[in-house]
Amino acid sequence: MGDEYLYWEHEHAFGREEDEQDLLTRYVIPAGERDRFLAKLDLMNINAYSLFRDESSLMQMLAYREIDRRNL
C-alpha cells in the first residue's frame, strides 16, 4: 500500500486482518516534563479546543494559557 490512502465503509475497514489497523500507542510523560510538553503542543495548535471544539475545551485551553503557562 505504501503512501496510498483508502476510504472504506466502517465494516470493511474493521473486517480486514491487518496488524497496522487501529493501533493505539500510549506515551507516559514524566510529571516534570508536563509544562514543557504542553507548551510545545500549544505552539503547534494542539490543545483541548483545537481537538474538541466546544465551550468546555475552550475554557480549558484559555485557563492553561493564562494560569498554567504563567505559573499563577
Image (cartoon, rainbow, N blue to C red):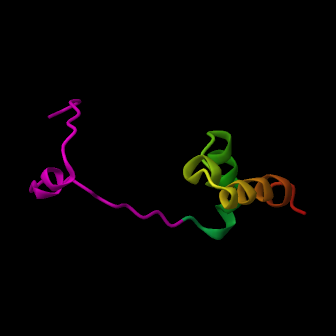
Q: Residue at position x 68%, y 61% from top? A: 56
**What residue range appears in magenta?**
1-28
Residue 9: percent from left, percent from top: 19, 47
Residue that sits furthest to the bottom in the current view: 31
Helix, strand or loop for the magenta stretch, by majority: loop
Would you say residue 5 sits in the magenta stretch?
A: yes
Q: Quadrant of residue 8?
A: top left
- The quadrant of the rendering that contains the N terminus is top left
> Seen in the image, is 39 located left or right of residue 25?
right
| Residue 3 image offset from top left, x and y in percent | 23, 30
Q: Position of residue 10 (x, y in %)?
A: 21, 53
Residue at 34% in and 61% down? 24
Residue drawn at 23 percent across, 33 percent down: 5
Residue lying at the far top of the rendered structure: 3
Identify the image quadrant of the C terminus: bottom right
Q: Position of residue 13 (x, y in %)?
A: 17, 51
Q: Residue at x 42, y 64 (%)?
A: 26
Please state which of residues 53 and 50 is positioned toward the viewer in this rendering.
53
Count of marks overlaid on the render: 0
In the image, 52: left or right of 21? Answer: right
Q: Give the residue furthest to the right.
A: 72
40 displayed left or right of 21: right
Question: Which sits in the foreground, 38 or 63?
Answer: 63
Verify whether residue 4 appears in magenta. Answer: yes
